[in-house]
Amino acid sequence: MKNVGTIVRGIRTPIIKENDDLSEIVVQSLLKASKTDDFTFNDKDVVAITEAVVGISEGNFATLDDIAYDIKQKLNSDHIGIVLPILSRNRFAVCLQAMARSTKKITLLLSYPSDEVGNDILYKEDLIKYNINPYTDVITYEEYIEKFSHFIHPFTGVNMVDFYKKVIEDENCEANIILANNVKEILNYTKDVIACDIHTRKETKEKLKSLGANVITMADILSKSVNNSGYNEEYGLLGSNRATEERVKLFPRTGCELVEKVQKRLKEETGKTIEVMVYGDGAFKDPVGKIWELADPVVSPAYTSGLIGSPNELKLKYLSENKFKDLEGEALNEAIKEEIKNKNKDLKGQMASQGTTPRRYTDLLGSLADLTSGSGDKGTPVVLIQNYFTNYSD
């Protein structure tokens, strides 16, 4: 039996720039790492590549003027409602800047007590103090300033209400901010709306349309090229982040082509069939800040076919304490190995699989890769995951 289970390695690469041959960089970085760190490759290894370097290498960028132009073409309004954005200086503030550039007035509807991915906008105990019901009550900007403006985000140290108001006004656009959890409130101010939520955007759009709004989502902005800009036909502005003060990097478009190319090249170099995926934000929740990390529209926008599916696993603790409770030592080990080897192909709903969280492989692996690579200066935009598909019986 192998005595080591899943192994995860962050793979350092050169700094990746626009028009670089990313597939070649990934393959050569992996081969170099295998020599310097003395490891070999196996079938069913997984190579994960962060979406950031995919978008950079393919040159999928757009300027704020490109975004503003596209919004004008789609809404052509002097007063736009912006509903349910996340609270992010890197992710949304730059998009808000372009939105403000496209109009004369913005009414910004923010959810409370937190945004879609868990960033708080006020202290929850203050809702109790002031007897406010987040399901029904609307908080005006003036009321927010009076009762809640002492809030500071525990990680960033920034009050995003003040920050977003300044972003809008710096574009010579009038800013009105309200806090509400029912998007129909925006229609008291304007019927021209951008739905900025990520994972519930389709429901929000349909709800507002049914009430007579002229509404687009962030996925509708830059879904086609504007003035030779980058674009994403499926996700538009979703998954974008700040590149410079006047430019954003969009979610990558060529991931499917890239993963197939890297898999083919690795097969040529190693003789092994290695699975490859592109990953963005992992789907995990911070226990202190309560932030759910998934600000990208999906964890993995592209992956090879061997990563389709979900784990089908038995709970070892359940087996040892129930079915094999009278066994010990090597007899227990052998009994559990045989149970694993002979397990059903679909264990869903069975007690022996309870607590094994059969989420999609790409979501689990993407989260693992995201935690490994980080978002700072580790310099490991490629992650090699080995032995993930092995178990106690191997």
Image (cartoon, helix red, strand yellow):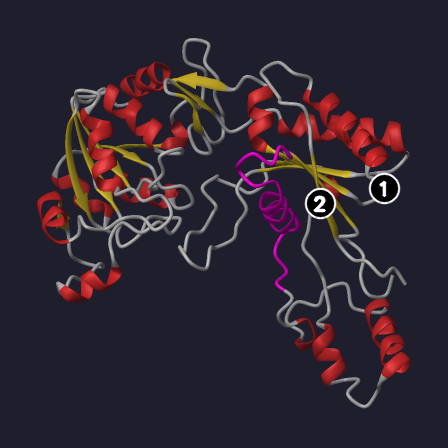
- In the picture of the structure, the residue carrying the numbered disc 2 is 307
Q: Vertical placement of 189 versus 313: above or below?
A: above
Quarter holding the N terminus? bottom right
Q: Vertical placement of 139 versus 232: above or below?
A: below
Q: Position of residue 225 (x, y in %)?
A: 45, 15
Amino acid marked by disc 1? Phe
- In the picture of the structure, the residue carrying the numbered disc 1 is 39
Q: How many marks?
A: 2
Q: Vertical placement of 364 versus 40: above or below?
A: below
Q: Which residues are magenta?
A: 357-380
Foreground: disc 1 or disc 2: 1
Q: Vertical placement of 42 versus 331: above or below?
A: above
Instruction: Identify the image quadrant of residue 299.
Output: top right
Q: Is residue 108 left or right of residue 302?
A: left
Q: Is residue 370 left or right of residue 34?
A: left
Residue 376 falls inside the magenta stretch: yes
Q: Position of residue 119 (x, y in %)?
A: 35, 49
Residue 289 falls inside the magenta stretch: no
Badge 1 marks a residue whose secondary structure is: loop
Q: CA distance from mark 1 to mark 2?
A: 22 Å
Badge 2 marks a residue whose secondary structure is: helix
Quarter holding the C terminus? bottom right
Q: Position of residue 317 (x, y in %)?
A: 71, 77
User: In terms of sequence position, does the residue under pointer 1 or pointer 2 come before the other?
Assistant: 1
Count residues near mark 1 (Cα–Cα under 10 Å), then give few for <14, some for 14-19, many for 20+.
few
Amino acid marked by disc 2? Leu
Q: Which mark is residue 339?
A: none
Q: Nearer the viewer, residue 11 or 70?
A: 11
Instruction: Identify the image quadrant of residue 193.
Output: top left
Q: Is residue 306 left or right of residue 248?
A: right
